[in-house]
Amino acid sequence: MVIKPKVRGFVCVTAHPGGCAAQVQEQIDYVKAKGPVKDGPRKVLVIGASTGYGLASRITSAFGSGAATVGVFYERPSEEGRTATPGWYNTIAFTRAAKAAGLYARNFNGDAFSDPIKQEVIAALKADVGPVDLVVYSLASPRRTHPTTGVVHKSVLKPVGTSYTNKTVDTDKGIVSEVTIEPANEAEIADTSAVMGGDDWEMWMNALNDAGLIAPGATSVAYSYIGPEVTWPIYKNGTIGLAKNGLERSARKIDAMLKVNGYGRAFISVNKALVTQASSAIPVVPLYISILYKIMKAKNTHEGCIEQIQRLFATQMYNGSALGFDEAGRVRIDDWEMRPEIQTEVAKIWPQVTTENLATLTDIAGYRTEFLKLFGFGLPGINYESEVEPHVVME
Ligand code: NAI
């Protein structure tokens, strides 16, 4: 079938297998071109491994330091006549490339919040890999079924305390409008923390530890975001930000556990705002990203997921000396985004943006290109007019 993008709001309901493979290959080529990450990880578990920051972490581990990788993700497989979600195709492409390079790669497509997936992964690690020296926790999910209570917690992206009004953009239609988001209630705040806080990360680390599958000196990292004040009511001080505070508390608990267990470490890396399936669902943020891309590209400091994670590994996690922490004990790979000269420009442009000047004042075109690329569209060297088989089986 000929596969074209079908954008519905902030998702695209189709994905192109060849295009997804091409964007995975671009990331692999980038990591290889940067050269080996000296003393990088060797045995890595990535939870949330199929798209965005998790995929970039898996690629950097495998192609930066030759790591065996185990990936956990939740993607809709392809069927006869129906495309998969992009992470399915990304993973197939990654696994083929890893195996061709002689690297171990194993995949688990299922609910990372559930006990059965944890047990399956633990059994596979015991059988094939042994203790891991890096666990990357990179889940972004709208819901979590709690493994012991069975309660389904749904996360919301809302402010806390008071309602929030600001500009937002419909990235598909290019319309800038004002949006008012009512504050979350107590139940929504708690539910969002149950999904996006650190409870499940701790469960993974405790289960791995109990099974003797954490190598001495192992590292675990989870990703967070802070961003500029203009987004704080919906992000840092909103339901998601409160959940991320929980993730930070979990980092400290896991860090203490790993220290007992042989000088390991766990921490939060604060990453840059980027176009991913997760971030495109947050109100206001896509407009901020469109402005940010414009400014960072002009200053030659723009990065995507792979550039961010390669830099995190090479200059922080495996730099041969201690991690550089901020005052709250977080690693900041959002440092270039948060530079005053970048944020001053963002603050200058923000109030001026309208539907009419969106294309000139912001990089909405770049945003759309990146968004479509997430689904395998717009890659060079792919003929999007030709017939392709959407059903690709994961070995
Ligand atoms: P993404 O949507 O690209 O990736 C999410 C991953 O989680 C995918 O591999 C997906 O399959 C997996 N997943 C979702 N639900 C699952 C489940 N129930 N079981 C197993 N796997 C599941 O998201 P992105 O943006 O890469 O986010 C990853 C982390 O990075 C999140 O913690 C996010 O808050 C953080 N982050 C994202 C930023 C951004 O601008 N995109 C900025 C800074 C941090």
Image (cartoon, rainbow, N blue to C red):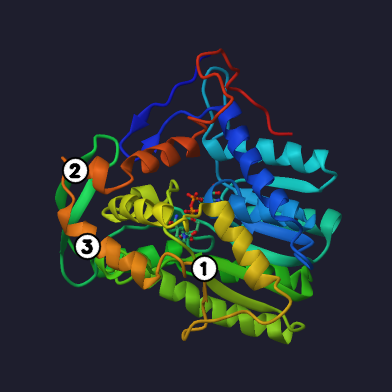
Which numbered disc flags the more N-terminal residue, 3 or 2? 3
Q: As rendered, which of 146 and 290 lies closer to the eye?
A: 290
Task: Using residue 120 as the reference point, say whether residue 278 is left or right of it.
Answer: left
Q: Closer to the N terminus: mark 2 or mark 1?
A: 1
Q: Is residue 355 visible?
A: yes
Mark 2 residue element: loop
Q: Label 2 amino acid?
A: Asn
Q: Is residue 186 left or right of residue 263?
A: left
Camera-nearest label, 3 or 1 = 3
**Residue 346 percent coordinates (x, y):** 28, 61
Q: Give me the residue at 50% from left, 55% from top.
A: 303
Q: Position of residue 167 (x, y in %)?
A: 18, 54
Mark 3 vs mark 2, CA separation in Å = 14 Å
Residue 41, position as x, y percentages in the image: 75, 64
Q: Name the amino acid type tagged 1.
A: Ile
Label 1: how many Cα within 10 Å (few below 14, some 14–19, many 20+): some
Q: Secondary structure at mark 1?
A: loop
Task: Give the spatial CA distance, label 3 vs label 1.
Answer: 24 Å
Quadrant of the rendered image containing residue 239 = bottom left
Q: Which residue is mark 3?
A: 348
In percent of width and height, residue 295 lies at 36, 56
Determine the image quadrant of residue 98.
Answer: top right
Q: Are marks 2 and 1 in contact (CB under 8 Å)?
A: no
Give the residue number, with chain letter if any, for mark 1.
333
Above or below for 124 versus 228: above
- Is 237 drawn above or below residue 138 in the view shown? below
